[in-house]
Amino acid sequence: MDKMRMESVNIIAENIDKIGALFPNCITETLGENGHPKKAINFELLHQMLSEDVVEGDEVYEFTWVGKKEAIVEANKSINKTLRPCPEESVDWDKTENLYIEGDNLEVLKLLQKSYFKAIKLIYIDPPYNTGHDFTYSDSFIAKHTEYANARGYFNGNEEMNFVQENRFHSGKYHSNWCSMIYSRLLLSRNLLKEDGVILINIDEHEVTNLQNICAEVFGEKNNLGTIVWDKRNPKGDAKGISSQHEYILAYAKNKVAFMRHCKIQRPKKNAAAMIKKAKQLFHKINISYTLEDANKEFLLWLSKQTDLSGGERAYYRIDQHGDLYQAVSMSWPNKKKAPADYFIPLIHPVTKKPCPVPERGWRNPSATMQELLKKDLIIFGQDEMVQPRRKYLLKDNMYENIPSILSFGGSDIEMLSQMNIPFDTPKIVSICAEHIACFTGKEDIILDYFSGSATMAHAVMQQNAEDGGQRKYIMVQVPEQIKETSMAYDTGYRKITDIGKDRIRRAAQKIKNETNANIDYGFRVLKCEETTIGTDHIGLDLLFTCLLKWGIPLSFCYNTEQIMNYIVYNYHNGDFMACFYENIPEHVIKEIAKKQPSRVVFCENSFKNSLTKIQVEEIFNFISPNTKINII
């Protein structure tokens, strides 16, 4: 029985929770009047989150680095960029719902804020590991040598002196650059995730601690889903200390409660189907001279030779009288306190007709449930009533298992990429990505990877869709980094990483189609992040996609072009949005557009001769389609 609280609601605590829902990185702890910790707001950080300029104040020890405030400013700063459509580089431009975006991912994340706000189910990224080499993402807010030296108090007028003497692997500047780079991107990432969305991040030992701290701040510690330790079975040969042979995959939910409400962090048992098939084959051999016991012995021998079984799979090593694989599990009450009286009713042995022993704290289930299990033949009895009965779990009813914290996979996709004639040294593993896509997304969700590299995630999305009939969509983002002339990729004819990514998607699509003949989306729309220069010199499609970004409309919807008196009119997503960008559009064309009753319509400033013509256009829509919103660019 709950005791009623007679005091009024703690409005301050509720307001802090509301602010925490919007800005989890601004929630901290302080001591209350009773000496116990309580939630509080870091007002300085909150001020910074709501400011376009760096707020004055000391950066003190919490989890901070030089340039952290500027990273927040950079994440909040607007840009004069757009995404220019490139149908000529795309595949199935008119039909596909997949996007491949070329550009700096910080800028692209900003551009996607309205069109994909709370729309992404899974963000899966493999950022630079900071292994001692410069990374490509040299953002404007990353601290300069002089700024860092001044902050540390040892600048002597020579930018290079102190930094040359420092070991780069222990340089604070080195970590500050990386922290600033990832921090601003994660701040923007959180906005794009659905309420039950999740982010997975690959990282190694160099920045895992900093990344964990940053994720805890951006997403909130309570939304930590755990860390997967990926044993790659190959110790690093150039280690100065203990040789790491593992990396990490950090998992954070946007809202863990919402995520757990809709998702179970489980994966299919990879070998379950093969195990069930083998058990059935042996069961069908049973005759006068080959017994069920013989079948079980042969199955155990076969099982002992399988090297890649999980612990959850190995537990199912017995074949029952129906040919089903099962494991026997205790039915004892799991809690320390005794169960209610209804949980102590004994089971009667089917042969001796005598009661079997009841567990000391009672059964796991009430008597009605125990009777249902008996009817379904899911309780296993011993030879006589002296043996406590156990619950039978059938493998066919338990085809999924929890995702373990250890991932053992020492393989590589380099050979597969070589067969596809795609030269890339450090690709992610398609099978691992596909498994996580299956575990963390539904069949119609959107997956985002803004460190796309060779576009492994696009490959994995298509692979998983082909396997389970899904219609998942992907958004790949990759900076068009120049390829070194000394590389095999350059010799093959590639000049930018994005060239490799797009070509890999094309070849992976053909490979999957040949192998599966699955009816899935094999195409992608190419968009390029460029300066915004709205005007008559831009083609209509450029203006169309600039408008989609401005008004927060997804970029993957189908559209068609219609000709009205030789004027091209864009009809986006079945009339949700229509556009015509010509000069001096005739009244007849305006009326034909209005008859289609779009939700929104857009014209250029010079689409009308004068202000009187604009008024006439408004009158036409008010009469024919009064609910249409008219926009002028």
Image: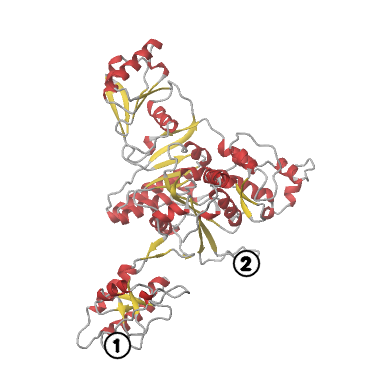
**Residue 30: where, in percent of width, then height?**
65, 51
Q: Is residue 523 above or below residue 563?
A: below
- Of the residues tagged 1 and 2, which is closer to the observer? 1
**Residue 266: where, in percent of width, then height?**
40, 61
Number of numbered discs on residues: 2
Q: What type is the residue that disc 2 sits on?
A: Ile
Q: Is residue 286 left or right of residue 315?
A: left
What residue do we see at 34% from left, 79% from top? 345
**Residue 440: where, in percent of width, then height?**
41, 55
Q: Is residue 281 left or right of residue 501?
A: left
Q: Which mark is residue 242?
A: 2
Secondary structure, mark 2, is: loop
Q: What type is the residue that disc 1 sits on?
A: Lys
Characterize the local packing of mark 1: few (<14), some (14-19) or many (20 or more) Cα atoms within 10 angstroms.
some
Marks 1 and 2, how far apart in space? Answer: 61 Å
Q: Is residue 546 above or below residue 89?
A: above
Q: Which mark is residue 354?
A: 1
Q: Nearer the viewer, residue 6 or 200?
A: 6
User: In terms of sequence position, does the residue under pointer 1 or pointer 2 come before the other?
Assistant: 2
Q: Give the colour scheme of this rendering.
A: secondary structure
Residue 418 shows in this picture: no
**Residue 296: where, in percent of width, then height?**
31, 82
Residue 301 sits in which quadrant?
bottom left
Secondary structure, mark 1, is: loop
Task: Tell me the quarter of the image containing the C terminus.
Answer: top left
Residue 553 shows in this picture: yes
Residue with the most extreme left position: 288
Confirm or deny contact between disc 1 and disc 2 (CB under 8 A): no
